[in-house]
Amino acid sequence: MGEKQRRKLLVLYASQTGNALDAAERIGREAERRACPASIVSTHEFDPSSLTHEEAVVFVVSTTGQGDSPDSFKEFWRFLLQRNLGNSWLQRVRFAVFGLGDSGYQKYNFVAKKLHKRLLHLGATSIIEKGLGDDQHPSGYEATLDPWMLSLWSMLYQIDPKYFPKGPDVVIPQDELVDQPKYMISYHKQETLEPELMAESDIIERARGMSPGKLSKDKTKPDCFLKMTKNEVLTKAGSTKDVRHLEFQFVSSSINYEVGDVVELLPSQDSLAIDAFIKRCDLDPESFITVYPREAANNGSCGEVITHVPIKLKTFVELTMDVTSASPRRYFFEVMSFYATDEQKKILQSFASPEGRDDLYNYNQKGRKSVLEVLVDFPSVQMPFEWLVQLVPSLKPRAFSISSSPLAHPSQVHLTVSVVSWIIPYKTPLTRKGLCSTWLASLTPEQGVNIPVWFHKGSLPAPPQSLPLILVGPGTGCAPFRGFIAERAVQSVTSPIAPVMFFFGCRNKEGDFLYRDFWESHAREGGMLSEVKGGGFYTAFSRDQPKKVYVQHKIREMRKKVWDLLCDGAAVYVVGSSTKMPCDVMSALEEIVMEETGGSKEMASRWLKALEKAGRYNVEAWS
């Protein structure tokens, strides 16, 4: 291998929401600041059989949900698991793994851990210990990434000084390294447009198809549109929460879905905020644009991209750029500094440096600053639109568990939505609100808004009616189980159904007992949750007595019945907040297995893991 090849660093990333891509690009930029060329490639675009030709590879992988791999990693991972590869297949390869995860989940950074282990089994040599970025840290994954990268550069230099000809600590000043934005924009005359191509779904597909935030596996065109038919407040006066039961009907075409499925909604941003962003950035909202990668233009392969039907600039911003709710990342501040005046330039440069990370957290992440707020705070900055298109966080669809059954609620989709709001503890407290939930709560059926949606499978497989169920769903975690029970009620009319135990929890019986009438009607004699049918409905109202009572306490109280149902082949479904509940429920079930079998904690843990492997222990949790 030539000297030039030997110095190049390959950074492979697997991203579901874009965070791993951000981290990979940051590693690449920092390597190039040390005069080491870096190539950044998604795992789904890289041929894994060519790994043997690489000398140094950095993997950046995220873990989603309950230890799941990003879609873009699955094929790559299947290749690595081939038995014929052998334990010396990667003996000439050195590697480093950085993971992005959330310690609130049980399988924290599971993908990074299993990848690191598998690469070692294949004979590769680890450059440094794997880095595990944690979403729960105030500064996010960057709190781990910064020191991890410094160790990486140091170890690479020890392995071969040619990676960094002037040493790992000699950094090219940022002012000399700022590159051109990765995307280019073409402006078009309005009269060249074809008006018949302006259907709503086409507009969304065009805008999101051109967006840098689009991940390769994303579907840009909505599966269909939904229209609201009901907006009902479930919580009572005095509750600390605002939870809504929302009903929708399909517009024009309908989609077949199953209980346990998830629907993603694309929220609308506040039009006044969009106008303010466009004005602040000195853009023409009525101009028509196409957006395409600079790389495609440079290598002459952009003909097809540039022939995309243009879209109005304001529409592109509304549908693809989250200017009102998402906080910008550190690189945004770094690029801003190039377009700022002296005083503001110093502040922005400090924010972009590792030393200024805590200051940036206090200014940006802690207060959940939006892009618009940041731009208003730094009036001297006038960033080109190309940079804004690249760096403003993409507007992401929000996912919700479906709380209806297509059998019980034909041509309808029901959701159970908690309206998100929280207070930032500043001297003058600041209230923040969730973009999608606040928007949904503000809608009325009379408005007739068409909501673009995408359907997909979640973590909860639809159970056959012959399968006994143990359901655990405190708070809005009960949403999918409303669909489960409604479906079984319809099925029971014509055929026998298996027993269902349901454990529900909330703070107060009178304040936030969601769907109370529904559950209690099915718990009566003959209902889906009735004891006469072998099931049961058990409630934990945590704040209604001096000592807090949670769902795991109720599970322990019903240990004998839970164990009997497990022995009859029951599947366990756990849905709700990821903070402690899933772990506490697992611990309660471990105790029951230990008591009933006389086995050890390790044996009980293995027993439940086998249940999970068999598809009979399913968790859907969110932070």
Image (cartoon, grey):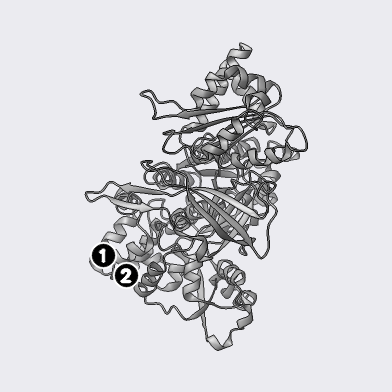
Q: Residues within 10 Å of mark 2 (few under 14, many from 20)?
A: many
The reply, left or right, for residue 129 in relation to residue 92 is: left
The reply, left or right, for residue 182 in relation to residue 546 is: right
Q: Secondary structure at mark 1?
A: helix
Residue 91 appears in the rendering: no
Residue under circle 2? 381
Residue in view at x 46 percent, y 36 percent: 579
* Alpha carbon distance from label 1 to label 2: 8 Å
Q: Position of residue 547 (x, y in %)?
A: 38, 23
Amino acid type of disc 1?
Gln
In the depicted view, which residue is nearer to us: 154 or 601?
Answer: 601
Q: Position of residue 126 (x, y in %)?
A: 55, 39
Q: Position of residue 99 (x, y in %)?
A: 51, 43
User: Which image quadrant is residue 518 in?
Assistant: top right
Q: Which mark is residue 344?
A: 1
Is disc 1 in contact with disc 2, using a CB cutoff of under 8 Å?
yes
Location of the N terminus by quadrant is: bottom right
Q: Residue furthest top?
A: 598
In the depicted view, which residue is nearer to us: 488 or 42?
Answer: 488
Residue in view at x 53 percent, y 43 percent: 97
Amino acid type of disc 2?
Val
Q: Residues within 10 Å of mark 1 (few under 14, many from 20)?
A: some
Q: Is residue 90 above or below residue 428?
A: above
In the depicted view, which residue is nearer to us: 160 or 316?
Answer: 316
Residue 223 appears in the rendering: yes
Residue in view at x 41 percent, y 33 percent: 508
In the depicted view, which residue is nearer to us: 140 or 584?
Answer: 584
Q: Is residue 619 above or below residue 426?
A: above
Q: Position of residue 177 (x, y in %)?
A: 41, 65
The reply, left or right, for residue 188 in relation to residue 149 is: right
Q: Residue furthest bottom?
A: 191
